[in-house]
Image: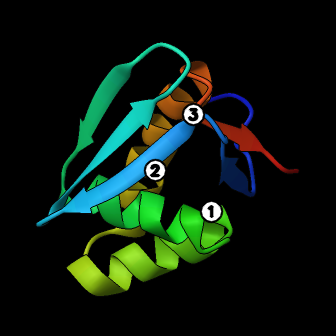
Amino acid sequence: MPNKPNAVKLAESALVQKVSEEMVILDVNNGQYYTLNEVAADMVELVRLGSSTDEIVNAICSQYDAKESEVEADLHALLATLLDKQLVYSVD
């Protein structure tokens, strides 16, 4: 992702519900549902809490004992998709 945001917020049009270990996001503007796996759900939950991208990477690395480079790549891919769908916006 060429322009990596340092922080994002959920758009008002994104309704989020955690179900078990997954998360569902409803885009109220178009009625589309998006289902996130456990790791992506944890990332979005941290976005909801106001964490920066660096804080999210650190938290996910600790929680899942994962490599920083992999978590960072996964987070930025997720954010790129959510930005494209206008479900989050950059607050940089």
The residue pinned by badge 3 equals: 87
Q: Is residue 53 left or right of residue 3?
A: left
**Residue at position x 68%, y 68% in the image:** 52
| Residue 71, quarter of the rendered image | bottom left
- Residue 65 seen anywhere in this rendered image of the structure: no
Mark 3 surroundings: few (<14), some (14-19) or many (≥20) residues within 10 A? many
Q: CA distance from mark 3 to mark 2?
A: 15 Å
Q: In x, y percent, where is residue 91?
A: 84, 50
The residue pinned by badge 2 equals: 75
Ranked by sequence position, the earlier of labels 1 and 2 is 1
Kind of residue sitting beneath label 1: Thr
Q: Against 21, is 23 above or below?
A: above
Q: Is residue 51 left or right of residue 34?
A: right
Q: Which mark is residue 53?
A: 1
In the image, farthest residue toward the top: 30
Q: Is residue 84 left or right of residue 2?
A: left
Whether the residues at callouts 1 and 2 have beta carbons within 8 Å, the answer is yes
Ranked by sequence position, the earlier of labels 3 and 1 is 1
Whether the residues at callouts 3 and 1 have beta carbons within 8 Å, the answer is no
Kind of residue sitting beneath label 3: Leu
Which of labels 3 and 1 is toward the front? 3
Secondary element at tag 3: loop
| Residue 51, quarter of the rendered image | bottom right
